Image: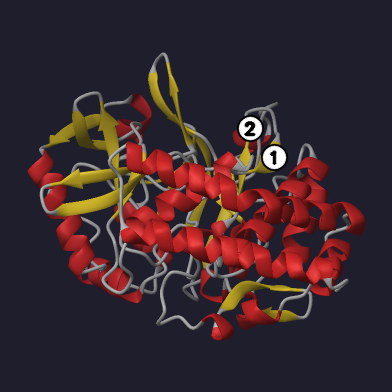
Amino acid sequence: MMLHVLMQGRQMGRLTMDGHGQPQFAYEADWVALPDAFPLSLSLPLHRDTHASATVAAVIWGLLPDNDNTLHGWGARFHVSPRNPVALLAHVGEDCAGAVQFVTAERLSEVLSGDADGIEPLTDEEVASRLAQVRHDVGTGHWLGDIGHFSLAGAQAKIALLRLDDGWAVPSGRIPTTHILKPPGTDYSGFVENEMFCLRLARAMGMPTAQSDRLALGDETAISVERYDRVRTDAGWARVHQEDFCQALGVMPQIKYQNQGGPGAEALARVLWDNASQPRRDVEMLFRALVFNYLIGGTDAHAKNYSLLFGGSGEVRLAPLYDISSALPYPQLQKRKLKLAMKVGSHYRWWDITLNDWRATATAMRLDVDEALTVIASMCLHLPSIAEQQRDLMVSEGIDHSVLDQLLAEISSSCQRCLRQFAAGH
């Protein structure tokens, strides 16, 4: 099996499976010769003739759902092996994270010419029905009869749609999805409001984040997140390329957590120092994001929840933050047992992290330790009042839930606890 790999509507390369069932990727010579050419992934350099199949596998598996139920459901539906990423992408790879599309030989001319372009409007009831289905069965995620071929990475239940001026639609061909809709899980009350609050709070603290809103359709609610890898132009929506840090480092998504062998803060910082167009700015922003996630109890900030954006002239920068939420409002997640996705200093356990751990992390990220501690102290001092402002703003917009008051109390307590370490000279 061979798939054509398109990037921003141009032929970039070819994806195949070798005789041992391992994925192989090669760039087209015409793509490499372009003055503005950039790689599919930093782990797959443009001017290397061959790429290790393990690295190719990490990149393409990173575009597929990190959920066995979804993969097995797709395998049964498309009559392919759920462990064959190339076969899966043949059915769902025309709309992925970033600007890449995987297209079969049979559809190539249609997609390139625009003949495959289409928009299938959905009623609010149809969107609500999809949210209900994916909420009850994460493995749904793809509907028979849809004109589009979509894949969303990650483990959470979600759907991707095109936002129209008057509603929602399923796009196809060169037309991308523009928003990701995530219904709440069953275990954590107020998840939609929690994630929306945390994203807005991070933005208010000066960190770029994905734009989000609360969507209510009938009995269904969801957080609607505008994709930062899509941009509106005079000609319509266009794709912007991106990859997460697991892909950039050639790490399989199943080991995204550092304590399972995945990347930590030092590895992410090294990618930025080596590749970002403005490395110091981005490493400092990454450090701020790590501190923010610590103070709000964001325990799922693993390497797949940080990404890179690729510009048209080869620029590489840290992408806006996304998938931020707090574990602190939920008593079933005991604070003293909470573990972060990435180690801070020598500790994963949230309760055990000290200023010495932050000193070690700043040093590992090649940042000035005193400046790093100033960032932490400043965030501790300002976060509670800005959190209150964001809560009040959400309530004024009619977005209210008891989880918001719990978040305020827990974040304030977390900041005070950290400030006491400064007072004690730790």
Q: Nearer the viewer, residue 345 or 386?
A: 386
Q: Are marks 1 and 2 in contact (CB under 8 Å)?
A: yes
Q: Is residue 163 left or right of residue 278?
A: left
Q: Is residue 70 left or right of residue 205?
A: left
- Residue 86 location (% of width, % of height): 41, 61
Q: Is residue 90 left or right of residue 292?
A: left
Q: On the rendered image, what quadrant is the N terminus found in?
A: bottom left
Q: Residues within 10 Å of mark 1 (few under 14, many from 20)?
A: many
Spatial CA distance of label 1 from label 2 is: 6 Å
Q: Amino acid at mark 2?
A: Gly
Q: Quadrant of residue 105?
A: top left
- Residue 130 location (% of width, % of height): 16, 53
Q: On the rendered image, what quadrant is the C terminus found in?
A: bottom right
Residue, x 88% and y 71% (percent of image)?
A: 425
Q: Which mark is residue 311?
A: 2
Secondary structure under tag 2 reads: loop
Across the whole image, how many numbered discs are drawn on residues? 2
- Residue 110 location (% of width, % of height): 29, 32
Q: Nearer the viewer, residue 271 or 379?
A: 379
Secondary structure under tag 1 reads: strand
Q: Which mark is residue 1?
A: none
| Residue highlighted by disc 1 | 316
Q: Amino acid at mark 1?
A: Val
Q: Is residue 226 above or below residue 138?
A: above
- Residue 148 location (% of width, % of height): 25, 43
Q: Quadrant of residue 287?
A: bottom right
Q: Quadrant of residue 403?
A: bottom left
